[in-house]
Image (cartoon, grey):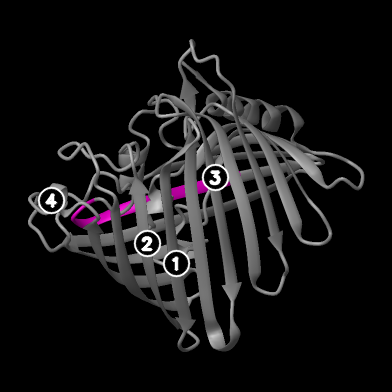
């Protein structure tokens, strides 16, 4: 097995040791999300197509420390992590890299192009929501976010323009994969185009061409965010996968939020997916045709810019009730989550 991430971490250490000078900038930041989860049924865990907030009781969803070193045009990032997210979402990764949130080395080009090359383990270019909960409008992650990559490993060429357009072209190990088998010969590519008008509106298109769960496919992601008058926010996202000229997966979500007071925010989300061949939402006990959807509502209190406390109620359902309701774990039910996010 090979890993861009492990190589990047080694290069980071060597580069810092050999080239540390007065012009070198070192910054340090961290994030932790502590939560308490419970649900209507007496099952011991939440549905296994969810990767965040999976435990019942008190737990740490994700916690990481990020170290960034910048020297002239070079940048090195190393960030270890832990939490129940790691246990759920990185179970198939080698132990040597399983606890790496980021590990990359990058170079910024000179001139007016404002572009850069990065190599290693990086945040995913697909999707509206990240695994940093305090940045998301809703507490829990949407079904679309939970089943698209949170991280990626490979090479990214990216840049920005003066009119708010940013772009990225990527060559990747695979669909959220740090390490790949030696016999994997098919290339995997990605692209992202995003426009931020600097007035509260962001439009994004991302795609992925390559191997997904053992098949070659094309995945498309479109989302938009808009800050409205009087403290309102709206987010919309739409994903679909095309394989053999058919839409095997299609899904969408819509979220609405409102700033009530200086420290308080409320939000709600409605979502539904259709997974024709059960590539994303099959479970260990129900391997076919779950097609889940749901809605959620949360309220947030932020007493300090580095602290956000949140509580959410979420209800899941299925388009195929005959496959779903007979199972206590996956029956349409309420999921309750409370969380505190800390950043520095």
Q: Are marks 2 and 1 in contact (CB under 8 Å)?
A: yes
For marks 2 and 1, the one nearer the N-term is: 1
For marks 4 and 3, the one nearer the N-term is: 3
Residue drawn 34% across and 36% down?
Answer: 279
Main SS, magenta residues: strand
Residue 220 tag number: 3
Q: Which residues are magenta?
A: 55-67
Find the distance from the CA under tag 4 to the CA under tag 2.
Answer: 20 Å
Task: State the residue position of label 4.
Answer: 322
User: Horizontally, is 23 left or right of 34 in the view?
Assistant: right
Q: Mark 1 falls on what kind of element? A: strand
- Where 315 sits versus 153, above or below? below
Residue 254 tag number: 1
Question: Where in the figure is residue 12, as x and y percent of width and height?
Answer: 64, 31
For marks 1 and 3, the one nearer the N-term is: 3
User: Horizontally, is 115 left or right of 17 in the view?
Assistant: right
Indicate which label's residue lies in the foreground, 4 or 3. Answer: 4
Q: Mark 4 falls on what kind of element? A: helix
Q: Mark 3 falls on what kind of element? A: strand
């Amino acid at each position: 097995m090979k890993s861009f991430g492990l190589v990047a971490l080694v290069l980071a250490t060597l580069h810092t040791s050999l080239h540390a000078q007065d012009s070198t900038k070192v910054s340090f930041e961290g994030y932790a999300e502590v939560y308490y989860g419970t649900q209507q049924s007496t099952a011991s865990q939440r549905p296994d197509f969810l990767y965040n907030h999976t435990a019942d009781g008190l737990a740490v969803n994700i916690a990481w420390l990020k170290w960034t070193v910048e020297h002239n045009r070079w940048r090195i990032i190393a960030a270890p992590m832990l939490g129940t997210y790691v246990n759920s979402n990185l179970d198939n990764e080698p132990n040597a890299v399983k606890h790496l949130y980021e590990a990359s080395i990058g170079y910024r080009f000179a001139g007016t192009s404002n572009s850069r090359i990065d190599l290693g383990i990086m945040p995913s270019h697909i999707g509206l929501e990240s695994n940093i909960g305090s940045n998301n409008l809703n507490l829990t992650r949407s079904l679309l976010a939970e089943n698209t990559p949170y991280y990626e490993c490979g090479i990214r060429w990216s840049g920005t323009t003066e009119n708010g357009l940013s772009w990225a072209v990527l060559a990747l190990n695979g669909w959220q994969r740090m390490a790949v088998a030696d016999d994997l010969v098919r290339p995997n590519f990605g692209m992202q185009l995003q426009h931020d008008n600097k007035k509260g509106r962001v439009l994004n298109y991302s795609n992925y061409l390559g191997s997904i769960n053992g098949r070659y496919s094309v995945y498309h992601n479109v989302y938009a965010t808009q800050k409205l008058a009087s403290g309102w926010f709206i987010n919309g996202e739409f994903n679909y996968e095309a394989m053999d000229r058919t839409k095997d997966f299609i899904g969408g979500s819509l979220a609405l939020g409102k700033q009530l007071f200086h420290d308080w925010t409320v939000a709600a989300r409605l979502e539904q997916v259709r997974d024709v061949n059960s590539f994303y939402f099959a479970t260990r006990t129900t391997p076919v045709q779950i097609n889940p959807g749901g809605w959620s509502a949360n309220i947030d209190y932020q007493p300090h810019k580095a602290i956000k406390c949140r509580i959410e109620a979420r209800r899941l359902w299925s388009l195929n009730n005959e496959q779903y309701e007979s199972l206590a774990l996956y029956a349409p039910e309420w999921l309750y989550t409370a969380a505190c996010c800390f950043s520095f």
